[in-house]
Every structure is written in C-alpha cells, then in structure tokens.
Image: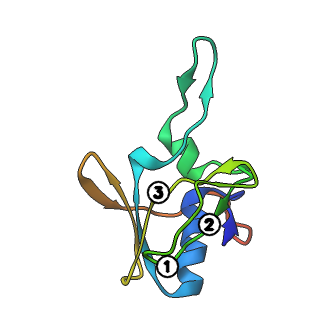
Amino acid sequence: MIDISDGLSTDLGHLCDESRVGAKIQAGKIPVAAIGRPARQVELRFALHGGEDYELLFTAARGKPVPSRIAGVAVTQIGEVTRGREVFLERDGVKRKLPPQGWEHFRRD
C-alpha cells in the first residue's frame, strides 16, 4: 500500500519497484475529478501524474474479497499486478508503457 500524493504514475512505479513486479492499469477505471458548472471531468493526465491526491493505492491477491468501501471511501479496482517489471496503461484497447511523471523527491532538474 502507498499513498499517491506524488502522482499515481510515480507512486505505482515505486510500489512495483519495491515489490519486484509490474502492473497494467485501465484508463477508463481511474477515478477523475469533476469540476465546474456544469461539471466536467478533468483530463486523465492530472489523475495519472498530478500530486496531492490523498488516496491510497493497494494490491490484493487475486480472488481475495475486497470490500466496495473502506471507512466510507469507495474502493475502485483500476488494474492488475503483472509478473513483468514494467507499468502499462491500457486505453481504448491500446497498451502503452506508463512512465512516472509525478513528483520525484530526489530528482535534480
């Protein structure tokens, strides 16, 4: 489990690196914010790479029951863990590598 305050793409990469696994996530399953009136969804890139989202990302064994809510917060399955070491995003039937583009604490620019 990890919080995604540095961005989903970055923190998913950290989770996978530390666990020596990869992941495939589905773009259409990632919750995105709606803003304005009338409400419209923000671009997926903000959900993938934006930070300061105080959400938790966790894995569960295949077949293990996961509640639909934990402490009143909805749980959403966005993908699956894979044996490979790479992270992919599947969107409209196309699978592409998902590079970490969120906040990196020790990156020098």
Of helix, strand and loop, which one carries label 2? helix
Closer to the eye: label 3 or 2: 3
Badge 3 is on which residue?
78
- Disc 1 residue type? Ala
Of helix, strand and loop, which one carries label 1? loop
Q: Which residue is depicted at the point 55% across and 31% down?
A: 42
Residue 37 picture location, percent across and down: 62, 12
- Disc 3 residue type? Ile
- Disc 2 residue type? Asp
User: Quick one: label 2, few (<14), some, or many (20+) residues within 10 Å?
Assistant: many
Query: Counting residues from the N terminus, which is met first, the one under dot 3 or under dot 1?
Result: 1
Q: Which residue is depicted at the point 54% across and 51% down?
A: 48
Query: Counting residues from the N terminus, which is met first, the one under dot 1 or under dot 2?
Result: 2
User: Quick one: label 1, few (<14), some, or many (20+) residues within 10 Å?
Assistant: few
Closer to the eye: label 3 or 1: 1
Residue 61: image tag: 1
Of helix, strand and loop, which one carries label 3? loop
The reply, left or right, for residue 64 in relation to residue 52 is left
Query: Counting residues from the N terminus, which is met first, the one under dot 3 or under dot 2?
Result: 2
Q: Are marks 1 and 2 in contact (CB under 8 Å)?
A: no
Tell which residue pokes out farthest to the bottom in this image.
20
Please indicate, yes or no, whether residue 108 appears anywhere in the rendered image.
no
Badge 2 is on which residue?
11
Closer to the eye: label 1 or 2: 1
Q: Is residue 80 above or below residue 72?
A: below
As rendered, which of 37 and 50 lies closer to the eye?
37
Q: Are marks 3 and 1 in contact (CB under 8 Å)?
A: no
